[in-house]
């Protein structure tokens, strides 16, 4: 049903001047006797009056207001928990009889005028109950309820019918949500605890170093098995590494089991932990878990050559040794005559080269071996020699004086991100001692820190880095930054700002430059079984310019030797390729392509993990479901389900009114009216010998 009104954005009294204007215009036009007879003159005056009056009325921008009333039928949402735990731990006869009753109730509600929306927790809409497969690998009750609240906000939602066992393994506790509509809850599953062993959790480091020992901790949960013994085994590539016997002392017991293993093979390794099933167990589906651990080569090694002990060196050592991925060695010029023969990843020269020329040979050796360098300037540094050697900063006009400057972070530096609060805190830390002179960036050097004298910021670099070459280098002009750590700890009880900044500098210097022309890699190393695996492709020519539309072959092979082959062509706007339906396991991938007649190959590993969330809990939680139902709805177990107890007598629709506004001048018939009236006036004047 619609109602139409005309509204003016101005006072309706303006219609009177419009009428006066139309009358005056028509009177002045046709007051003198012309060639027309009086009836013709009056008719023409009337036409001109109507045209001018309507035109003046339209200048007021009148609007047509349309009010449309619509009646929305009430909606009852059937929210069905489609997780595997429903089918695994429920009586199948009671379950399917209950679904049949729900299907019949759905049809009765439809006859009463209700709109019935059946969907699972993932939001998939179902036509009939028998479409439920009960194979979902996770349960997010709160997310599903929130989705319904969002979808039906402001609409006529009569209630939610929820079928669930009360177990959730994703999202928050659903009882924490406020629900205004009634929730009718149907409980499925068994609330009686079963005798069971459950390998509940594994704790381990995802990355370990080759040649080291590493721990795997298993948490075993036991129900109703007091006095029994169980055996837990750990295997690698099908080979039994170790087994342990655990003693179950209580009806509900939680037992920690530790394993110590050797990291021997490089790469992604899978370790399978299994609880040997007992005869009394209800299910063995929750008796095993896998630990996927990446074994990498040794730590990154950082070597520092110093002229003499200095507080800054202690600060530097503490930062580096906080990171388990780094190994730090400190050498002094009095004892070291050459670089270590073993490979290392970064060389720090503290007050080297010095005024006696010490360390020059080692600097040249670093350049020859392609080792990244960080020069830290102090009072004993030979600055003229440093100007020749480093590729980041030049210091001109130094006469031996020292200045004290604060550090100002270069906010336009894009080598790494530093939080704004850290940037602000850096400038408030104690000043550093720097050589006084005209300091400028050299070549491709980029400033990380500028010098700030008092409250005046300058463009003089304090710390600069050059990342344009394969061998990276940096120069830090200041000394005394150990005071940063002392003041920050005195003020806050921690040293996050200074530590974070220097860690990022070290990571940037030790980062390996990737100059490969052909790169294909997964966006992440671990995926769940139901996830799409996304591969990113990057192809470059010899000038390292991106090129597109080259065919790429991708091969994936799991541990059992099953191979999956794909072909794709990355484009300028889409350089990704998606792979679906990979099962659990460790996959080796090989990608190949031909660039200018040369074959390039890229390879690596990725992990597909199986979601075992539904096997973690086997006892239904009806208390949670009853709390969720509250006072507005109700709770029934599926084996005693009687939907008629909840069935409403009638469907009460809700009337919604929708208002719309449209300027009258937008109506086509207005133009047609003007054309008709002016045409009639012109026609009568024409046939009577006038214009």
Image (tube, rainbow, N blue to C red):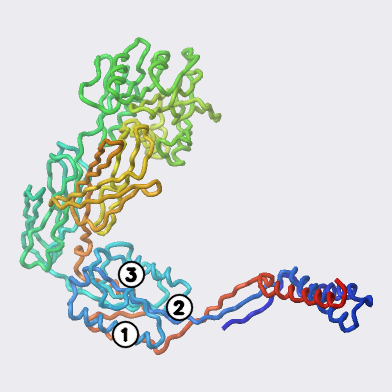
Note whether 467 is above or below 15 in the view shown: above
**Callout 2 environment at 10 Å: few (<14), some (14 to 19), or many (20+)?**
many
Where disc 3 sits, the SS reads: loop
**Callout 1 environment at 10 Å: few (<14), some (14 to 19), or many (20+)?**
some
Residue to which mark 3 is pinned: 124
Q: Which of marks 1 and 3 is nearer the N terminus?
A: 1
Q: Where is residue 122 in the image (x, y as percent from the top left)?
A: 32, 67
Task: Please name which of the two marks, 1 or 3, marks the residue nearer to the observer.
Answer: 3
Q: In this view of the protein, can residue 274 be seen by the observer? A: yes
Residue farthest right in this picture? 33
Q: How far separated are the C-alphas under marks 3 and 2?
A: 21 Å
Q: Where is residue 647 in the image (x, y as percent from the top left)?
A: 35, 86
Q: Position of residue 426 (x, y in %)?
A: 45, 34
Q: Residue 105 carries which label?
A: 1
Q: From the viewer's perspective, tell me whether residue 217 is left or right of residue 41.
A: left
Residue to which mark 2 is pinned: 156
- What is the count of numbered marks? 3
């Amino acid at each position: 049903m619609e109602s139409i009104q005309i509204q003016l954005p101005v006072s309706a009294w303006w219609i009177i001047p419009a009428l006066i204007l139309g009358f005056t215009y028509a009177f002045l036009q046709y007051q003198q006797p012309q060639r027309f007879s009086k009836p013709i003159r009056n008719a023409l005056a009337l036409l001109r009056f109507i045209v001018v009056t309507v035109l003046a009325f339209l200048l007021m921008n009148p609007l047509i207001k349309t009010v449309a009333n619509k009646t929305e039928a009430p909606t009852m949402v059937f929210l069905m928990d489609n997780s595997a735990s429903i089918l695994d731990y429920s009586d199948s006869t009671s379950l399917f009889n209950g679904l049949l009753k729900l299907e019949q109730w759905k049809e009765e509600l439809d006859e009463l005028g209700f709109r019935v929306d059946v969907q699972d927790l993932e939001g998939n809409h179902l036509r009939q109950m028998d479409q439920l497969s009960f194979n979902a690998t996770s349960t997010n009750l709160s997310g599903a309820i929130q989705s319904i609240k969002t979808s039906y906000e402001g609409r006529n939602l009569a209630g939610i019918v929820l079928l669930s066992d009360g177990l959730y393994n994703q999202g928050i506790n659903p009882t924490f949500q406020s629900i205004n509509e009634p929730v009718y809850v149907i409980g499925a599953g068994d609330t009686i605890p079963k005798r069971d062993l459950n390998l509940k959790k594994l704790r381990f480091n995802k990355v370990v170093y080759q040649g080291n020992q590493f721990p795997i901790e298993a948490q075993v949960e036991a129900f109703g098995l007091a006095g029994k013994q169980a055996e837990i085994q750990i295997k690698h590539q099908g080979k039994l590494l170790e087994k342990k016997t655990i003693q179950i002392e209580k009806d509900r017991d939680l037992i920690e089991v530790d394993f110590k293993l050797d990291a021997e093979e490089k790469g992604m390794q899978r370790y399978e932990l299994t609880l040997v099933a007992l005869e009394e167990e209800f299910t063995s589906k929750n008796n095993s878990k896998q630990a996927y651990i990446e074994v990498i080569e040794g730590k990154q090694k950082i070597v520092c050559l110093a002229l003499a002990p200095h507080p800054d060196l202690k600060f530097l050592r503490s930062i580096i040794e906080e990171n388990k991925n780094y190994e730090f060695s400190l050498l002094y010029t009095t004892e070291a005559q050459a670089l270590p023969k073993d490979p290392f990843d970064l060389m720090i020269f503290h007050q080297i080269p010095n005024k006696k020329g010490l360390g020059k040979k080692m600097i040249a050796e670093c350049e020859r071996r392609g080792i990244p360098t960080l020069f830290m300037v102090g009072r004993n540094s030979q600055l003229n020699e440093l100007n020749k050697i480093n590729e980041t900063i030049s210091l001109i006009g130094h006469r031996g004086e020292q200045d004290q400057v604060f550090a100002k972070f270069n906010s336009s530096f894009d080598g790494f991100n530093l939080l704004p609060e850290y940037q602000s805190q850096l400038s408030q830390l104690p000043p550093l001692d720097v050589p006084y002179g005209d300091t400028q960036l050299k070549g491709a050097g980029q400033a990380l820190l500028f010098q700030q004298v008092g409250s005046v910021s300058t463009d003089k670099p304090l710390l600069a880095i050059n990342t344009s070459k394969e061998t990276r280098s940096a120069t830090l002009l200041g000394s005394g930054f150990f005071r940063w750590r002392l003041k920050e700890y005195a003020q806050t009880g921690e040293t996050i700002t200074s530590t974070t900044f220097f860690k990022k500098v070290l990571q940037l210097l030790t980062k390996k430059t990737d100059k490969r022309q052909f790169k294909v890699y997964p966006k992440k190393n671990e995926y769940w079984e139901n996830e799409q695996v996304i591969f990113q492709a990057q192809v470059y020519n010899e000038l390292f310019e991106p090129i597109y539309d080259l065919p790429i072959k991708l091969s994936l092979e799991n541990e059992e030797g099953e191979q999956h082959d794909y072909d794709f062509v990355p484009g300028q706007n889409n350089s990704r390729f998606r792979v679906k339906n990979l099962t659990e396991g460790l996959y080796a991938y090989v990608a190949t392509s031909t660039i200018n007649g040369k074959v390039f190959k890229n390879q690596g590993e990725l992990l597909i993990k199986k979601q075992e969330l539904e096997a973690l809990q086997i006892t239904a939680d009806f208390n949670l479901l009853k709390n969720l139902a509250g006072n507005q709805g109700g709770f029934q177990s599926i084996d005693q389900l009687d939907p008629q107890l909840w069935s409403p007598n009638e469907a009460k629709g809700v009337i919604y009114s929708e208002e719309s506004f449209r300027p009258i001048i937008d109506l086509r018939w207005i133009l047609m009216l003007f054309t008709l009236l002016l045409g009639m006036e012109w026609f009568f004047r024409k046939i009577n010998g006038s214009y």
